[in-house]
Image: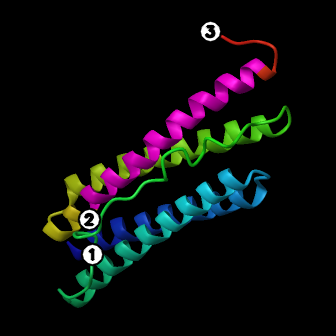
């Protein structure tokens, strides 16, 4: 049982690491300070997730019940309007649209992964961690979808057409 639980946790750590790296790369390539800060914020969030997952793996392998988890941690999301200052230009618009779309795909994959992991686990604390991560990733997803829709509409208008 522990081998399967540990494999799920290891995969989750890798998934969070990939998200963190993508967000840091996106921040580094952004010319807009607001968007840069938002992606750095999200990278830090993914780093926190990694820490929780690693702590849970440690708890499972050492039977150490003192390992901290996310149980008392308040969910945080990007500040309201953190992406609002970003106005894509003709060249940067497609990069921003792509980055936010990839962010949506990463967050959706994380939600699906943690829901399935919560369903599969037999360890109560691990299930609680996965459920907390589902909530957290859903908040990220909602923020990304709103910004993506706005950016996509603006990009279409910059290209001289709009489906609306």
Residue 143 image label: none
Asked if the residues shown at circle 1 and circle 2 are in contact, with their CB atoms under 8 angstroms apart, the answer is: yes
Q: Which mark is residue 164?
A: 3
Name the residue carrying label 1.
69
Task: Please indicate whether residue 97 sits to the left or right of residue 66 in the image.
Answer: right
Cα distance in 3D space between marks 3 and 2? 41 Å
Which residue is drawn at the image coordinates 60% and 45% (left, top)?
83
Above-or-below relation of 39 to 47? above
Residue 96 seen by the camera: yes
- Image quarter hosting the C terminus: top right
Circle 3 packing at 10 Å, graded few (<14), some (14-19), many (20+), is: few
The residue that appears at 45% across and 48% down in the rendered structure is: 140
Callout 1: helix, strand or loop? loop
Does 126 lie within the magenta span? no
Residue 154 as seen in the image, left or right of residue 46? right
Task: Name the foreground residue: 134 vs 109.
Answer: 134
Q: In the figure, is residue 68 to the left or right of 93?
A: left
Could you tell me which secondary element the residue under label 2 belongs to?
helix
Q: In this view, which residue lies farthest toward the right?
A: 91
Q: Main secondary structure of the magenta part?
A: helix
Please indicate whether residue 143 sits to the left or right of residue 39 in the image: left
Q: Residue at x 43, y 54 (%)?
A: 77
Residues shaded magenta: 130-157
Report the residue marked by disc 2.
129
Sequence-wise first label, 1 or 2: 1
Asked if the magenta segment contains residue 154, the reply would be yes
| Residue 162 sits in quarter | top right
């Amino acid at each position: 049982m522990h081998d399967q639980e540990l494999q799920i946790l290891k995969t989750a750590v890798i998934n969070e690491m990939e998200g963190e790296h993508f967000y840091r790369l996106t921040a580094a390539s952004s010319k807009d300070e607001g968007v840069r800060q938002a992606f750095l914020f999200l990278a830090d969030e993914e780093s926190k997730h990694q820490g929780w997952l690693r702590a849970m793996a440690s708890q499972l392998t050492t039977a150490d019940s003192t390992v901290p988890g996310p149980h008392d941690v308040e969910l945080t999301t990007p500040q309201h309007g953190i992406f609002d200052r970003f106005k894509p230009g003709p060249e940067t618009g497609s990069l921003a649209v792509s980055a936010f779309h990839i962010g949506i795909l990463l967050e959706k994959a994380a939600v699906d992964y943690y829901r399935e992991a919560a369903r599969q686990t037999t360890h109560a604390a691990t299930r609680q961690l996965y459920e907390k991560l589902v909530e957290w990733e859903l908040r990220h997803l909602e923020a990304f979808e709103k910004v993506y829709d706005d950016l996509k509409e603006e990009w279409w208008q910059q290209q001289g057409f709009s489906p609306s």
